[in-house]
Amino acid sequence: MSYVTRFAPSPTGPLHIGHAFSALTAYRCAQSHDGTFLLRIEDIDRARSRDEYEQQIYDDLRWLGLDWPTPVMRQSDRMPAYRAALDRLIEMGLCYPCNCSRGDIRAALSAPQEGAPIEGPDGVIYPGTCRGRPMSEAGPTDAIRLDMTRATAHLDALPAFRETGPLFSGVHPLVANDMIVQIGDVILARKDMGTSYHLSVVVDDADQGITEVVRGADLFAATWIHVLLQALLGLPILQYHHHALIRDDTGKRLAKRDDARAIRAYREDGLSPDDVLKMIGLTVTPSAT
Ligand code: GLU
């Protein structure tokens, strides 16, 4: 099977040099496997996505020397595919509607018997207040959650995924109890969106024929959710490569919205693409082995 990977930015702000590192790492992984590099625009958050940022993504990546097949997949065009996947999970009896606000969740977690809240990939673990509500009650003010206990019990065996990145390399089997305790009932469809990052990414990676996901180590914890959804939806279990995150001189991780580090700003300051590559510690001439 030939190698396919992708870079999947959200057009909610300018690309910064952390994105440049991620895109170039994915591009070079594709080159070294004689494979394909795809670009995908993750614009399900309509309130925060902007056309001008999308255009700037294309300009900045081209300036860095990347190319990709067109047309580019845009998540905002794909709502029916996400709805179909959600409906399958609902039909499997694994979902429930939830109308808890952040404040409700905080209040439930501050009850004396709850102990210290555990942080998962999406923030504090949902305390399960709405678990057990039937899907027939779902209305426009509800998000849809995955019941993690049911979801992990639904499969005869939980899958494992292979990680090839430098930080977590090896085979990682999913463990039901860890999924329930450390991840919990994640949101599959936000009420204002009809989908979520997790559901959309899984559906798109499968539809684009991705074989290895190359992305930052900050998304490693989300991978367990993605692999579980792949198994539940009968999709191929992908291979992953999470790269280290770019840090500034003081060792601080570069924030996504650190506009001072925007690729655009470096371009305007007269830096060349090679200067940017050197700055993020990449060799200037990619080896095409
Ligand atoms: N759209 C996500 C982001 O910009 C990346 C998603 C992914 O690579 O899975 O952080």
Image (cartoon, helix red, strand yellow):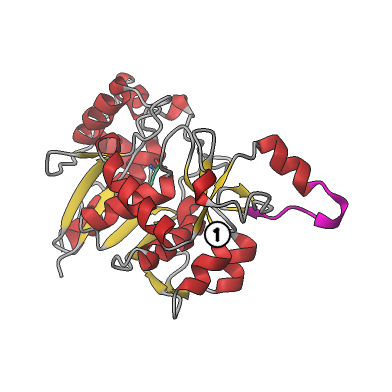
| Whether residue 6 is situated above or below residue 35 in the rendered picture | above
Query: Which residues lie in the magenta part?
Result: 110-119
Q: Quadrant of residue 171?
A: bottom left
Q: Position of residue 206 (x, y in %)?
A: 26, 58
Q: Residue 12's quadrant in the figure?
A: top left
Taking depth in this image into account, of 125 and 288 the one nearest to the observer is 125
Location of the N terminus by quadrant is bottom left
Q: Is residue 185 above or below residue 1?
A: above
Q: Main secondary structure of the magenta part?
A: loop
* Location of residue 183 in the rendering, given as x and y in whole percent from the top left corner: 58, 59
83 lies left or right of 198: left
Answer above or below: position of 19 versus 25.
above
Give whichever of 212, 25 is nearer the camera: 212
Q: Quadrant of the C terminus?
A: bottom left
Q: Given the current orientation, which residue lies at the most extreme bottom position?
A: 156
The yes-or-no answer for disc 1 within 8 Å of ligand 1 is no
Query: Is residue 289 visible to the viewer in this orientation of the structure?
Result: yes
Task: From the image, tell me which residue sits under label 1.
Answer: 147
Q: Amino acid at mark 1?
A: Asp
x, y percent for residue 256: 47, 35
Q: Nearer the viewer, residue 83 or 53?
A: 83
The image shows residue 13 at horizontal and vertical percentages of: 40, 27
Q: Quadrant of residue 9?
A: top left
